[in-house]
Each structure stands twice: as structure tokens, then as C-alpha cells.
Image: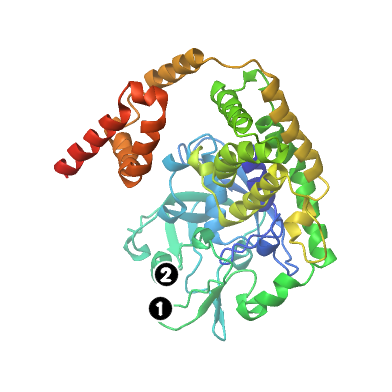
Amino acid sequence: MLYCAIKQQMEKGPIDAITGEARYSLSEDKLIRQQIEYKTLILNCVNPDNENSPEIPVKVLNCDTITQVKEKILDAVYKNMPYSQRPRAVDMDLEWRQGRMARVVLQDEDITTKIENDWKRLNTLLHYQVSDRSVVALVPKQTSSYNIPSSASITRTSISRYDSSFRYTGSPDSLRSRAPMITPDLESGVKVWHLVKNHEHGDQKEGDRGSKMVSEIYLTRLLATKGTLQKFVDDLFETLFSTVHRGSTLPLAIKYMFDFLDEQADRHGIYDTDVRHTWKSNCLPLRFWVNVIKNPQFVFDIHKSSITDACLSVVAQTFMDSCSTSEHRLGKDSPSNKLLYAKDIPNYKSWVERYYADITRMPAISDQDMNAYLAEQARLHSTEFNMLSALNEIYSYVSKYSEEIVSALEQEEQARKQRLAYKVEQLISAMSLES
């Protein structure tokens, strides 16, 4: 739900198709600095599964590129379908239907594209003067717009000299970096732009941008977006840091692991609560949850754009700060994401502490219960894992640290009874013969 909320909020305002910057953002790095004039339009999209059923209204912006419009339409039309099973925007053409006869194919680049000096501007709905409530359709892409048989009933006019997909794919997903990506045209060295020309805050100004305090205007805009998303961030953190949440109980493995860490701390005489807290943070929230927050596409069949990625990174950083035991001193040089969540972090920290304390108070889990649980998990997922591959991974670790492992097994009482050191040595020599 957090991912959907971020995506919806970002798409309410302009997003630059080249730089990935947006008007609505949690991340200062991905904030459009200029004032962009734009209007919200409703396009009525022909239902691709049935031309005669009612049209589907889709909210878009007049400053969207054609690829952005196609992506918004695909989101609306296939909202109940996993991302991997949907048609892709690059494989579809957007037709603007005027009356029953005329159909114009709109594209990011065609012969109408405006070029000034060495800058070429991607086509938008405004460029084509598409009006509110226009009827559009997504149709499978024609390989070349020239080869369309002109049937008597329909004139499908395309204003494209060539298929532009090999030069500009229209999606900023590859833009993991903050460096401006200006795609020079293959023939002419023309730089492509959409809403902002990159040189306005290109590499030469990167240093100044980072060091100066975020000007009030930008922080205000970041705070407004944060406010809209606040409930979703709170809900996520509350879910992750609750031992009983909406009927689902804490997984046994977490209780078992946290008890193991406390036992180890007792055994080694470590009574500093910060150390115990850090161990727990390192093995669950920071090892597991941060990865999922930052990469929801690992868990769900969705698509993560670069602006969504930038916002999720800010949430993930806030999550990490909430698990930390150190005090964050804020000053004028603090990064904007720290300033943004400065008031929330003490509250989140108390949730984390309460969560760890709640787990400590829960009844301990016996080895038998834990083994039964693991056996059940293994049974449920027996077909999904390759055991030999897993054993091979463990073996590569064992062979690397064979001396340390063998000497540890020789000192441990249980291991001596089962002659484990001898067995490991035999295994290693057998494996090295094999290889």
C-alpha cells in the first residue's frame, strides 16, 4: 500500500521522462526545481478487450510524454493484472481517435518533434493539443507505420518517419544515478529533453546543490508530499514493529533468534542494552526489512520507476535511523531526508524498543517446537529449493575456513562425541578428490 500511495502521489504531478525528477517527491535529488505549468486531463480509453464496452476514463497530465500516457493507461486498464503479464508500453501504439474515421498515432518522437539549437523536446499531449475527454486507444505496435494497409473505412495517419524505439525508450528506469542522462541523437548529436534541460543543474553545480541547506521552498514541498504519505509510512512501521498485528502472530523464528542473541550476550557478559539492540536490528530490520522496503518488486509483481525508488530510499533510510541507538544531531548541513523525518524518528525509535521488549517477554520456544516448525516449513516448500545447490554453497564456506571449523569442532564436547571434526575432514578430502 505504501508503494501504491507513493506511485499515485508522484503521478499526480509532472515527472521528467529523462531525468526521473518529479514535482512531488520525498527525495530532494529527484525534485523538479522549476515551476512547470500543467493541467490534468481525462482521456477516455477504448477497452482493448471489447471495443463496444464502455470506455475507461484515465487521468493524465497534458505535460506527460506519450510513453508516460501509455503507461498510465496500461495501469488503469490492467490494474488487476500482475505487471509481468501486462502488455508493455513499447509494444503498443497510442491512437487518438477523432470521429469514426480519423486515427492519429501519437509518439514520443516523430516529424513534428520540436528541435531548437541542439535540444530536441519529447512530444507531450500538449504538443499534439489533445483536449480533455478525448478518445484514445492502445493498439499493438505496427512494425512500420508505412506498411499499414489503408482500408476503406479507416485512415490511420501516422506522423512517424521511423520507429524511434531504438533511440529512446521513454522510461527513466535505467537512471539509477543522479548524473544527467542526455541521450544524443545518433545522427545529429541532438540532446533529448522533456520538462527540464539537464544543464540547468548539471554536473558543474552538483557540489553547490548538495552543500547548501535546502531552500525553504523545496523543504516545504517535500514536507507536503511527506504529509500525504504519512499514514502509509506509519502503518508500515507499525506493522513491522508489532508482535501481534491484525491477527497475525510473530513468527517463531524471530523469537527464537532474539532469545539466542540474548543468551549469547549473557554468556559473554555483555549487559550493554545498546549492543543487544544493535544485534537484533542488524539481523532482522536492517538485513531483511530494509531490502524489502527498498525493493518491493522482489516480493510483488510490480514495476518500480526511478522516482518511486528514490522515495522508497528515503523511507528505508528513516527506517534504518529508527533502529539506530545513536542520537542524530541535526544541523544546517543535515541531508533533507533527515530534516524531513526529524520529528517522527524518536517516536519510531520507541516503537522499535517496545517491539524488542515485547519479544523478550514472550514465552521461550523449545528446540523441539523450533525443529517441528522448520520441518513443517521444509515440507511445505520441498519442491522450491535445490538441496544440492544449497549444500554446495555451504561447502564452499566450509572449505575456505576448514582449519577454524575443525579446531572448533575438536574443542566442543557434543561435536567430539559425534566425531564431527573427523567427518568434516573426510568430507573435504572426498570433495577435493571429486573436483
C-beta proximity under 8 Å, tags 2 and 1: yes
Q: 325 or 15: nearer the eye?
A: 325
Give the amino acid type for the residue marked by disc 1 in the picture: Leu
Q: Which image quarter is the C terminus in?
A: top left
- The residue tagged with tag 2: helix, strand or loop? loop
Nearest the viewer among 303 and 435 is 435
Q: Nearer the viewer, residue 72 or 328?
A: 328
Label 2 amino acid? Arg
Q: Is residue 54 left or right of residue 319?
A: left
Q: Quadrant of residue 427?
A: top left
Tell me the residue that label 1 is attached to.
Answer: 186
Does the rendering let one see residue 81?
yes
Secondary structure, mark 1, is: loop
- Residue drawn at the location 18% of the way across and 37% of the way down: 430
216 in relation to 12, above or below: below
Do we see residue 243 in this rendering? no
Q: Is residue 224 left or right of residue 204?
A: right
Mark number, residue 213: none
Where residue 251 appears, as percent x and y from the top left, is 57, 23
Q: Position of residue 67 (x, y in %)?
A: 52, 58
Number of other residues with Cα within 10 Å of mark 1, as a class: few under 14, some 14 to 19, many 20 or more:
few
Residue 262, percent across and down?
Answer: 62, 29
**Which quadrant of the structure image shows residue 290?**
top right
Q: Which residue is mark 2?
A: 167
| Closer to the camera in the image, 327 or 336 | 327
